[in-house]
Image: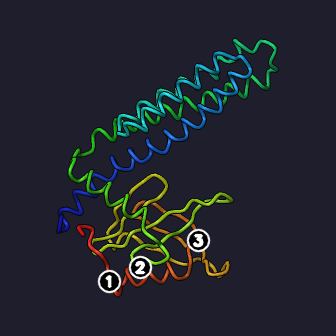
Amino acid sequence: MHDLSDWNRLDAASFRVSMKRSVRRFAWIGVAAGAIIGTSGWLAAFIPLVAIAMTLLCAGAWNLCRPSITGLIVDGVAMILTGAFNCLAWLWLADARATAVGRWIFAGVVQIVWGVRRVALYATARSTPNDPQAIARLEAVVGELSKRDAKEDATVVEFRTGGLRKQRNRIGLYAEGAVALVDTAARLEKRGDITIEPRGTIWHGRSVKVAIQLSDLELAGEMTAEHLERFERWKLGMAQSRSIAA
């Protein structure tokens, strides 16, 4: 791939790649949660809880072995089942207080809604262009970008978002545009559609608060002064950039 038409193909593939990254991430969460819940259920001799744990473990293991957009249905259905169990938990907890039952039902409803949203995302992902070559190429780019040394590589910038538990995000700076890895999403942005600007005068050591604009997404976070300068030089075309085709 050597021109902007190839960049557009990668851009079209970005939603499917993002969904596969999301499936893989939630698969790890499902396996971990299933192991904890299963152990608790086994120690308490509470078989329904063990059954739910097995559901999470099986869904997580399947999506780790076969990550694809179909995994959205797998983890969505698994979450709907666990939510339904929480809503019906009062059947096995006859001695529980009303407030405890209410918490179980509330948690169950939240899980069901989340599961339905995951299943709905599958319909959206399925309607996007399925270009195996572009998907494979973008996955390779994302994998390579994730492994780069942000301290030494002048074509990578990082920023953190969130409250107490900061989420590390990174952006690859290419001649054709930028590849932003934000949470589980892989976004391709043209040079004119992405901006990072300092906000306020509060500096924490060498970090500065910034506002990040990624076409239709606005984020607030922090990044080092070095990485902000690195981004600004790329934005102005003053820095040498690698091609995404390289």
| Within-10-Å neighbours for mark 3: few <14, some 14–19, many 20+ | many
Against 169, is 199 above or below? below
How far apart, in angstroms, are the residues tagged by discs 1 and 2? Answer: 9 Å
Left or right: residue 135 versus residue 226 is left
Decide: few, some or many residues near mark 2? Use Cα within 10 Å; few <14, some 14-19, many ≥20: some
Assign a secondary structure to mark 3.
strand
| Structural distance between the alpha carbons of marks 3 and 2 | 18 Å
Q: Secondary structure at mark 2?
A: loop
Label for residue 4?
Answer: none
Tell me: 121 left or right of 39.
left
Q: Are marks 1 and 2 in contact (CB under 8 Å)?
A: yes
In this rendering, the label closer to the viewer, 3 or 2: 2
Between residues 52 and 215, which one lies in front from this camera angle? 52
Label 2 sits on what residue type?
Answer: Ala
At a point 40% along the width and 37% down the height, the residue shown is: 65
Residue carrying label 3: 222
Real-space Cα separation, disc 1 to disc 3, in angstroms = 24 Å
Q: Nearer the viewer, residue 152 or 79?
A: 152
Say which residue appears at 56% left-offset and 73% top-offset.
223
Q: Given the image, on which type of amino acid does mark 3 rest?
A: Glu
